[in-house]
Amino acid sequence: MADFHFARHPKRKQKTYSRIGRFLQKLIVNPDRLFEGSPCWEWQGATDPAGYGRFKAFGQNYAHRVAYRYFIGEIPEGLDIDHKCRVRHCVSPFHLQAVTHAANKALSRNVKTHCINGHPYDEQNTGYTNKGDRLCKACRYEAIKRWRANHPEEARMVGRESKANWRSKGRR
C-alpha cells in the first residue's frame, strides 16, 4: 500500500489572552464622562437588556463585578456592587463601591425625580410596591383607566367581586 503524505501545514496557533487581557480589550476610557475627577471606563462588550456589561470570569457574569474583584478585591458576602457614577456599563474601579442591597436600591431610586412620563416623584404622586420600588400614582391611574376602557366586561366583573367582598365583611 502506498504511503500517503499529507501536506504539512504548520498548525495555526490560537492567540490566547489572559482573563484581564480579554477584559481590558472590551472597554474604552471616556474622558468626556467624568465622575469625581476620574473618567468612566465604558464597557464595549456584551450587555444585558438592563444595560449592565456581561463578562464571564472569576465565577462572575457581570463586568462591573469582575472589575471590582480584579482591581479592588473580593466582594464581601451579602453585598452588591453599586455604580457611584450611575452609569450601568461603567467598570471603572474608582466608581464602584460595595453596599447592601437595600442601600443600592435606595441610591438608585433617589436619583430619579420624575417618572418616564414626566410626573414628579413627590409625596402625593409616589407609591411603593411590595418590593419597595417606587411607582408613579398618576401613571398607574392612567394604566387602570386604559385597561378598564379596553376590557369593559372584565372591569364590571372586578367591580362586582370587590363590592361583594366589601359587603360580606359587614360594611354597607
Image: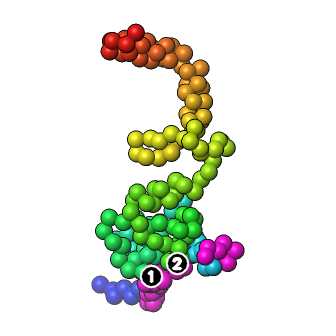
Q: Is residue 89 visible?
A: no
Contact, CB < 8 Å: mark 2 with mark 1? Answer: no
Q: Quadrant of residue 100?
A: bottom left
Quadrant, the N terminus: bottom left
Residue 71's disc number: 1
Q: Is residue 66 visible?
A: yes
Q: x and y percent of residue 50 in the render?
A: 52, 56
Amino acid type, callout 2: Phe
Viewer-closest of 57 and 82: 82
Residue 15 belongs to magenta span: yes
- Measured Cα–Cα span from mark 2 to mark 1: 9 Å
Q: Is residue 172 left or right of residue 135?
A: left
* Residue range of the region highlighted in magenta in the rendering: 8-36
Which residue does the image show at 57% across and 65% down from the upper left?
87
Viewer-closest of 65 and 117: 117
Q: Is residue 18 left or right of residue 111?
A: left
Quadrant, the C terminus: top left
Q: Quadrant of residue 6?
A: bottom left
Which residue does the image show at 38% across and 69% down from the upper left?
60
Q: How is the image coloured?
A: rainbow
Viewer-closest of 5 and 135: 135
Amino acid type, callout 1: Phe
Q: Quadrant of residue 129?
A: top left
Which residue does the image show at 44% across and 82% down from the upper left?
71
Q: x and y percent of residue 138 in the render?
A: 60, 34
Q: Badge 2 is on which residue? A: 94
Q: x and y percent of residue 62 in the render?
A: 44, 66
Q: Is residue 60 above or below residue 148?
A: below
Q: Secondary structure at mark 2?
A: helix
Q: x and y percent of residue 95 in the render?
A: 53, 73
